[in-house]
Image (cartoon, helix red, strand yellow):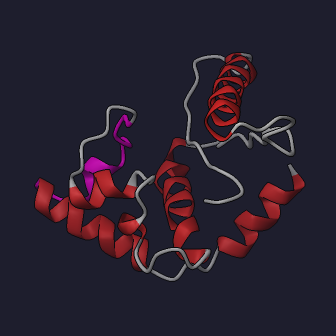
Amino acid sequence: MSNHFHLFVCVERGEDLPRFMHAFQLNYARYFKRKYQTVGHVFQERFRSPRIPEESYYLQCGRYIERNPVKAGLVTEAAEYLHSSARYYVLGTEDPLITPNVYYAEMGRDVGERKENYRRFLLLDEPYSSMVDAALVKV
């Protein structure tokens, strides 16, 4: 995304997340400023961190994040976006940063079936996306 990013991160303790995000954003900002020879703020706002109350929402939240580039008109299918975990789930592209969603394994009997079912899952119209958008804005 050109103006924001999404991470789906599981932490053992809630107090670990701000520390992780601080280090992540600080290191990226340093890299960005060095590469593009800029000064000043790289990130406009503090990160938002809505808590996902139930593990059963993990697949849906991942889907929401992976569909962002489609919604923004950057790609026609989520797996086309280079910086998306959809490439891992749909195409089988290895990524050392990804720990597979525990619910992905339930999407089919074998790897091929899971990939195809997840691809279809990403293509479905989402009746709840406006509610998720509204919830994220309020955080």
Considering depth in this image, is 96 or 104 the residue closer to the camera? 96
Instruction: Name the quarter where the N terminus is drawn.
Output: bottom right
Say whether residue 76 is left or right of residue 111.
right
**Residue 17 higher or lower than 137, as above or below:** above
Residue 104 in the magenta stretch? The answer is yes
Snapshot quadrant of residue 91: bottom left
Number of numbered markers: 0
- Residue sitting at x 58%, y 23%: 11
Q: Nearer the viewer, residue 36 or 48?
A: 36
Q: Position of residue 107 (x, y in %)?
A: 27, 59
Magenta region's main secondary structure? loop
Q: Is residue 43 above or below residue 133?
A: above
Magenta part of the chain: 98-110
For the point 70% across and 40% down, the residue is: 51
Q: Nearer the viewer, residue 83 or 29?
A: 29
> Residue 59 vs residue 37: left or right?
left
Where residue 111 sits, quadrant-wise, is bottom left
* Residue 76, position as x, y percentages in the image: 43, 80
Image location (x, y in percent) of residue 5 = 64, 50
Q: Give yes or no for residue 26 being in the magenta stretch.
A: no
Direction from residue 90 to residue 79 in the image, left or right: right
Q: Residue visible at 86% across and 45% down?
A: 44
Q: Quadrant of residue 126 in the image? A: bottom right
Q: Position of residue 8 (x, y in %)?
A: 55, 42
